[in-house]
Amino acid sequence: MVFDYDVDQDEQLTRLFWADQTSIMNYAAFGDAISFDATYNTNRYKMVLAPFTGVDNHRRCVTFASGLTLKEDEESYTCSKAKERKS
């Protein structure tokens, strides 16, 4: 499993990204095209759910990864590991 998260100064979760082993294998096999559709304020924590999905060779939807974020801005959608590599 791969995951990454960030918290704010009050130790409250601000974003979370995760992908399990099946999702990673699906991405390796079917990751030619990715659909990203963030929902807005649909859970009790007011966090945005952002699934990364695709279609397998049987035309079934498969999940590559998922994320939760507090804000819908570029910084929130950038994984903190990727930000660390830039600096």
Image (cartoon, rainbow, N blue to C red):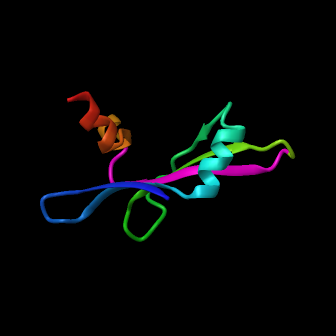
Point out the image quarter for the C terminus: top left
Q: Residue furthest bottom?
A: 44
Q: Position of residue 82 (x, y in %)?
A: 33, 36
Residue at x-position 68% and y-position 47%: 26
Q: Position of residue 3 (x, y in %)?
A: 42, 55
Residue at x-position 46% and y-position 53%: 67
Q: Is residue 49 visible?
A: no
Query: Seen in the image, is 44 located left or right of residue 11?
Result: right
Q: Is residue 65 visible?
A: yes
Query: Seen in the image, is 19 located left or right of residue 30?
Result: left
Magenta stretch: includes residue 71 = yes
Q: Position of residue 63 (x, y in %)?
A: 64, 51
Q: Which residue is at the front of the view, 3 or 38?
A: 3
Q: Residue furthest left?
A: 9
Q: Position of residue 46 (x, y in %)?
A: 38, 62
- Magenta range is 59-72
Magenta stretch: includes residue 68 = yes
Residue at x-position 59% and y-position 49%: 24
Q: Which residue is at the front of the view, 5 or 35?
A: 5
Q: Determine the main secondary structure of the stretch shown in magenta.
A: strand
Residue 22: quadrant of the picture: bottom right
On screen, residue 87 above or below 44: above
Residue 33: quadrant of the picture: top right
Query: Seen in the image, is 44 located left or right of residue 54?
Result: left
